[in-house]
Image (spheres, helix red, strand yellow):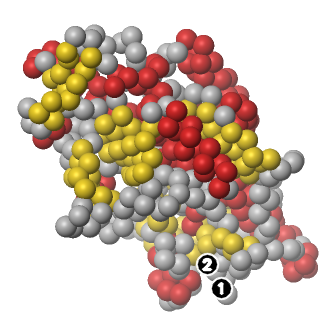
Amino acid sequence: MQASELTATRRPRVVVVGAGFAGINAAQRLGKLAVDVTVIDKTNHHTFQPLLYQVALAVLSPGDIAQPIRRILSGHDNIEILMDEVRDVDARAQKLLLGSGTDVIYDYLILATGSTHSYFAHPEWEKVAPGLKMLEDATEIRRRVLLAFELAERQMVEKGSHPPLQFVIVGGGPTGVELAGAISDISRLYMQKDFRHIDPKSAKVLILEGSPHVLAAYPQDLQDSAVRQLNEINVQVRTNAKVTDVQPGYVMVGDPPNAEKIESVCTLWAAGVKASPLGKALADSLGDPAILDRRGCVIVDGHLNPKGHPEIFLCGDLAHYEENGKLVPGVAQPAMQMGNYAAERIGLLVSNPAAAQRQKDFHYFDKGDMATIGRKAAVARIAWPFKAHWSGFMAWLTWLTVHIFFLIGFRNRLSVFRSWAYTYIRFRDGVRLIVGSQDLPGWDALTKEDVVKKEGDTEVVVKS
């Protein structure tokens, strides 16, 4: 396909790549300025990533946490949207090469393509242990978790036994903790009346964290509280547990010859992230590999620009920005603030260059962090409008309120509130749909090893 060019008009052309938190916030602010804006994303929707795990564990449906990009930005006549993927950056010519073969010219560029899973030089592990970044990941995790219970029920009917329902989550950050709590909730609470031959409450959830602490970015008291709350809902936490291999039906912890084999009916990955490939593409175009950190993020200055390029802005997970000697975290809050700052600065560069010269560096306004652990269980570090550390029900209630507030669209807020209220009051969740293959990695191997049989009303593990 011969490349065509979207030529610049008399107004500056701003191209925003990525419609996550940073990109959407930047586009909404740019929509009010005297510029023409092109938003490029490989999907047609913006996803509220903090609630992806609730889609993965059947509490919410995908439509509850996603909105079409065109709907979000439909009120801005100066914004066009292209559903395409940026394959390369030509910083000297100030253009992008899209997967469709189109060249897009820019005067200003905002790269906000986020991050992806990092399997620490073992990409083959991804097929066995999916991570959670996109809606497709969430529905795949939902398929595997629910399928484990369905296959156990079928196995019990056919053979009178089933493999132990042990779910292993690699990584004890917020995503790992939230996934573990949600699996525990559905097995202990929401599916207790749904099966006739297996006991869902017998399911075990294990978090394997390679460092000494779960929720390592949180204060020590909240880390300790998180472990206590996880233990209370029968989630086992193992720290200093370095996973060295991931295979269908099991993971290995530690190095040979002392490696330990841990069986897993479903393994999920929450252990690491790396920057999107566009960071490296930009570094290659600039001929400066030193602008990348070890994760592939682009090191930026106080105006969120790579060295020597005031027309290019990096926002969100793709940006390596340090403030007071500390790296600004790659989470939703700073991403939104970076998007707003980049748009504001572009507005000044276009309309008032003198004011742009005086503009202060980007400053991350930290309002705190929250992670939910399960029904009525969470931890919260409140930094604004006051400082506090909360655990348990109060932290959980705060988490609910904040996430509903930041959802885009009244329909989404109403739908999520209704789903949460129904789940809380009725002990039922309503999106337990298995779509796709009925194959579960490792199931066949597990059925040949340890199995669970019923003796009276009790399930016991025996050797097959």
Give the amino acid type for the residue marked by disc 2 in the picture. Answer: Ile
At x 23%, y 64%, the residue is: 258
Q: Is residue 153 left or right of residue 208?
A: left
Q: Is residue 76 visible?
A: no
Front residue of 376/49: it is 376
Total numbered circles: 2
> In which quadrant is the N terminus drawn?
bottom left
Q: Is residue 101 left or right of residue 406?
A: left
At x 71%, y 62%, the residue is: 338
Front residue of 301/230: it is 230
Residue 438, how many percent across, how many down? 21, 30
Residue 357, how many percent across, how many down? 87, 80
Q: Secondary structure at mark 1?
A: loop
Residue 188, how many percent across, how many down? 43, 23
User: To which residue does mark 1 refer?
Assistant: 307
How far apart in space, not on screen, are marks 2 and 1 (Cα)?
8 Å
> In which quadrant is the C terminus drawn?
top left
Q: Is residue 429 visible?
A: yes
Residue 211, how many percent across, how many down? 47, 62
Give the amino acid type for the residue marked by disc 1 in the picture. Answer: Lys
- Residue 194 quadrant: top left
User: To which residue does mark 2 refer?
Assistant: 299
Which comes sooner in the sequence, label 2 or label 1? Answer: 2
- Image vertical order of residue 192 relative to residue 80, above or below: above
Q: Is residue 417 left or right of residue 229?
A: right
Marks 2 and 1 close (CB-CB < 8 Å): yes
